[in-house]
Image: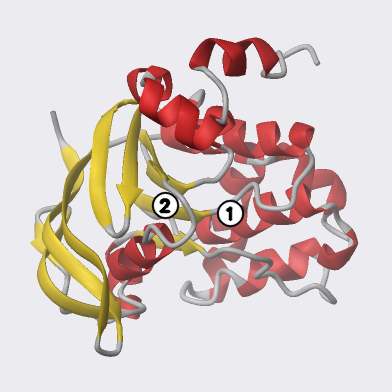
Amino acid sequence: MAYALEIVDLTAGYDGLPIVRNFSARIATGTVTTLIGGNGAGKSTLMRAIYGSNRWFSGQIVFAGRAIERLPPWERLKLGIGFVPQGRCNFATLSVAENLKIACYTLPRRQHDAAIAPVLELFPFLKDKLGMLAGNMSGGEQQMLETAMVMLLKPRLLLLDEPSLGLSPRMQQDVFEMARRVADTGVTVLMVEQNVHGALRMSDTAIVLELGRKFMEGPADEVMNDPRVSQAYLGVTASEAAAAAPTEAS
């Protein structure tokens, strides 16, 4: 099996305060892996550590066979790591088309249209909204626009931090399906989510963090059906959660 990302004994955090401690994992290429855990577990800290936007203390991060833990974020971006942080990160007073063009900032101008075309095929709903102000779209549509903006740079690893935050159940489902479509193109997706059941239904692998340390890792369906996870993060048994989940037709 090929691995897009390998993390070995990583300790990271902010200033003099380590949050994630001795974390190790291998993320298979072209898969969706979801990080779950309670508030303060270190999920977002781990994502920022992979992107290089917080403090690295020790350990190793290997992306596409290269150690990157000492590289700044812009160098990681050049290597193919894209990051969609938590919260809105588009230009709300600009149109969808303008947002997409701005996202091509690292590409020569003559390549912009060629870069945007395949992204519109991946996110076809954007074709009808190119003239709309980004801030007038729904939260879910803005989330997918922001992901499309990152996809313009053709990342090999896509980091999504709480992509369904604040969205309706229907839009949450759309966002998770979007993550699955991205992975099906060969891009590796690593996602932080509080909607455990919705995210794991679309994931290949799940990792549970507790107090900055890895508590559990395995196939998403097995982790979701583990009694410790279903009780702690779903609040019900796994069978009850599955019965309550929206169907594709709903």
Location of residue 15 (image quadrant): bottom left
Q: Which mark is residue 20?
A: none
* Picture residue at 69% right of the left edge, 16% below the top: 244
Residue drawn at (64%, 39%), measured in percent from left and top? 175
- Describe residue 218's horizontal placement relative to residue 110 as left or right: left
Q: In the rendered view of the protein, which quadrant contains the N terminus?
A: top left
Residue 31 in the image: above or below residue 8 = above
Measuring 19% from the left and 64% from the top, which residue is drawn there?
Answer: 21
Question: Residue 186 placed where, x, y %?
Answer: 36, 35
**Near-viewer residue (40 or 86):** 40
Inter-mark Cα distance, 2 to 1: 9 Å
Q: Nearer the viewer, residue 29 or 160?
A: 160
* 146 sits left or right of 213 in the view: right
- Say which amino acid is labelled 2: Leu
Badge count: 2
Q: Residue at x 58, y 39 (%)?
A: 195
Describe the element under mark 2 as helix, strand or loop. Answer: strand
Residue 28, can we see it? no
Residue 241 percent across, percent down from the top left: 60, 18
- Whether label 2 touches label 1, CB < 8 Å: yes
Q: Which residue is mark 1?
A: 147
Q: Earlier in the sequence, mark 2 or mark 1?
A: 1
Q: Amino acid at mark 1?
A: Thr
Q: Is residue 195 left or right of residue 21?
A: right
Q: Position of residue 188 (x, y in %)?
A: 35, 42
Q: Nearer the viewer, residue 56 or 130?
A: 56
Q: Element under label 1? A: helix
Label of residue 158 in the image: 2
In the figure, 159 relative to 12: above or below?
above
Q: Residue 53: image x %, image y %? A: 36, 78
